[in-house]
Image (cartoon, grey):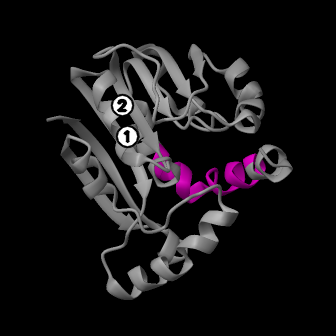
Amino acid sequence: MSLYERYVLPHVINLACGTRVVEAFRRQVVPRASGQVLEVGMGTGINLPLYNAKNVEFVWGLEPAIGMREKARKRVQASPVDVRWLDLPGEQIPLPDNSVDTVLLTFTLCTITDWQAALAQMHRVLKPQGKLIFCEHGLAPDQPVQRWQHRLNSLWGACAGGCNLNRDTEQCLQHGGFKITELHQQYAEATPKFAGFVSWGEAVKQ
């Protein structure tokens, strides 16, 4: 891990993902989590204040980056939610089959290299009656915006921890064996369109 990845990138991502606009999207989904929760890509713990603690038994926080977990320490200590860290990549979730009530994805799917394997693992650990709650940015519906997303994707990813601008959230979830039961989509306010098309809602196992 480079010095940039350990010490600089966590601050950059924390600032970018903690804006008023982004927090408004998070507030649409995080309070819905209940029971035993798996948060994939917990990062700096930015979602912790948004959980409805009385509905959550505990949260498995999947975050392989040491710098992110270090940055999250104060939020974890201050949170009424019990957080249990998992430090393996999202492609390898060390939990039993059908053991999680809620899987939470917020601005994470775009950064996972092997998203197919990661979603297969989320599908495996989610209970049959459980739900996957998501809020992700990705491929826009408008072709002019898409062209910019494709052009900028490599450069953007190099600066933003492997984030992909042009990943199709809806298609990825369906490919991963999930049925989307609720879907909302819009461009985020005060955000460049190439990075601001957001999809959020809920999905269940097919």
As helix, strand or loop, the secondary structure at mark 1 comes to helix
**Mark 2, residue position:** 121
Q: Does the magenta stretch include residue 23?
A: yes
The residues colored magenta run: 10-26
Image vertical order of residue 67 relative to residue 2, above or below: above
| Residue 117 numbered mark, or none | 1
Residue at point 57% right, 34% down?
42
Q: Do the residues labelled 1 and 2 touch (CB within 8 Å)?
A: yes
Image vertical order of residue 152 relative to residue 52, above or below: below
The image quarter containing residue 91 is top left
Does 51 sit left or right of 180 as displayed? right
Q: Which amino acid type is shown beneath numbered disc 2? A: Gln
Question: Residue 190: where, in percent of width, then height?
Answer: 56, 72
As helix, strand or loop, the secondary structure at mark 2 comes to helix
Does 127 sit left or right of 27 as displayed? left
166 or 50: which is nearer to us?
166
Residue at point 27% right, 41% down?
202
Question: Residue 101: where, in percent of width, then height?
Answer: 32, 19
Does 10 sit left or right of 99 as displayed? right
Q: Is residue 37 magenta?
A: no
Q: Which amino acid type is shown beneath numbered disc 1? A: Ala
Residue at point 71% right, 37% down?
68
The image quarter containing residue 128 is top left
Q: Judge the density around disc 2: few (<14), some (14-19), many (≥20) Cα neighbours within 10 Å.
A: some
